[in-house]
Image (cartoon, helix red, strand yellow):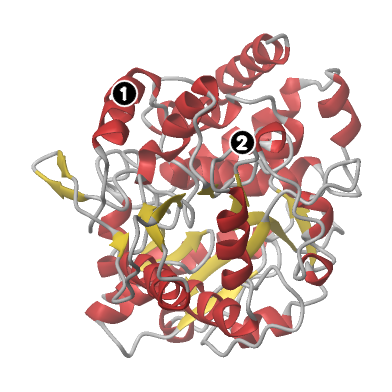
Amino acid sequence: MRRWMTTGAAILITASVALAGCSQRPGGTEKNAGSDVQNGSQTPANTSANSGGSSGGEKIRLSVYSTMNEPKNQEMMKGIAADFMQENPDIQVDFQFPGSEYENILKVKMAANDLPDVFDTHGWAVIRYGNYLADLKDEAWAPQLTDTIKPVVTGKDGKVNVLVLSEAKDGITYNADILQKYGIEPPKTFEELMAAAEKMKTESKGEVSPFYMSGVDNGMIGQFLDQYATSLLISPANNEAQSLLDGTFDWNKWTPLAQSLLDLQTKGYINKDVLTAKYSDMPQRFAQGKVAFVIGGPAFADDVYKVNSNVKIGYMPVTPMVAGDGQNFSGGERYTMGAWKDGKHLAEAKKLIAFFAKPENMSKIANATKLPAGLKNIESNHEFSPYYEQFADVRVFPYFDRVYLPNGMWDVMCKTGTALIAGNIKPEEFSKKMKSEYERLRKQ
């Protein structure tokens, strides 16, 4: 995997090491994603989207930061930028894909008020980055934002903060071949999901790990907690949304969720090496028929096909944890492009964003990321399109942590979940930790 850093970015990464928390949400930026990793070191590499176009004078250079971590998708983004530069030979587009350091780098840049010309808001277009972004509501593409994503990236004053390249629609990715082998239909309830896990583990004599998680890239553990917190606590039958928002939530109600995570481990439903396994190990095991379910989206599918092109990968919504409730997806922003309002090249930044918003380019992005586009009437044709169509009417809730938890709680959730699996704390202690950190961070 490749990553390019200017000298300034390298300094920022060094400065941000002390700020580094848990790895980020699977399907977004993963720990060590977008970089060359050998023996624990990261090797920077140039990822400028160079073009054959040229002009007589000095080029305007646009810096673009993205959370996209799959090398193939990075090349796709640079390819679109190269097409833009062919039409605009006086503009040079320089992409950076900082991987797991993305959020920390952006925090440092916000503090210095020195942001990239164009950057991905990774779920925080309004709350965190809103004051730094130019208003894009008058752009030609703005009215085409989908009905589900428009309210997520639009401020109360009607300001449109970003172009949404891809909407998140996180559910559960599964190995359809394994389910077929053991005669299992895609589960529709949490009880059915656990029964499927028991059947696979037992009949395979432990050869199949029903679920794959990583304590190294512990965003995978956070993803389980985040998605199932919605199923448990934001269900219409058991809705704690208001108490979470106003600070009156009884954190003892978190304990069943913590217990369910611990049960996965104690019952042998997670890979035995969970504490040392890496996210990057997962696609090969999935391709070899050793992993059945992965919590989150199918962004890793192409890495699976490199190992075994014949694997059939399925996709399904998150199963409900409350009796009588329905399935759901966790959603919101996935990949976006916003323009720094104080950038020296704001007009050119908007021009680049408008180029990415062209239907043909949005289709390229949808087919590469295997995610729904953030604009209406964008054609896509990939192996997961039928699943999105099949589950088009399933509810999509915003990511739990982005709405109901104060900034900083994602890190707490990932690390404490890992400590739970390691046997260092009990479910009740997990709830106490969440309560204390929730109360502390709300005051900041």
Which of label 1 and label 2 is nearer to you? 2
Indicate whether 282 appears above or below 234.
Answer: below
In the image shown, does 401 or 322 lie closer to the viewer? 401
As drawn, is 274 to the left or to the right of 88?
left
Quarter containing the C terminus: top right
Label 2: state its secondary structure: loop
Mark 2: few/some/many CA within 10 Å (<14, 14-19, 20+): some
Quarter containing the N terminus: bottom left
Q: Position of residue 380 (x, y in %)?
A: 60, 86
Label 1: state its secondary structure: helix
Q: Position of residue 116 (x, y in %)?
A: 48, 42
Residue 146 lies in what quarter of the image?
Answer: bottom right
Three-letter code, disc 1: Val
Mark 1: few/some/many CA within 10 Å (<14, 14-19, 20+): few
In the image shown, does 50 or 187 lie closer to the viewer? 50
Q: How far, Cα to Cα, is label 1 from label 2?
A: 27 Å
Indicate whether 132 appears above or below 28.
Answer: above
As drawn, is 407 to the left or to the right of 37?
right
Q: Residue at x 49, y 32 (%)?
A: 417
Indicate whether 197 appears above or below 309.
Answer: above
Mark 2 sits on what residue? Answer: 342
Three-letter code, disc 2: Asp
In the image shown, does 436 or 163 lie closer to the viewer? 163
Residue 17: mark:
1
Residue 129 lies in what quarter of the image?
Answer: top right
Q: Residue at x 75, y 54 (%)?
A: 136
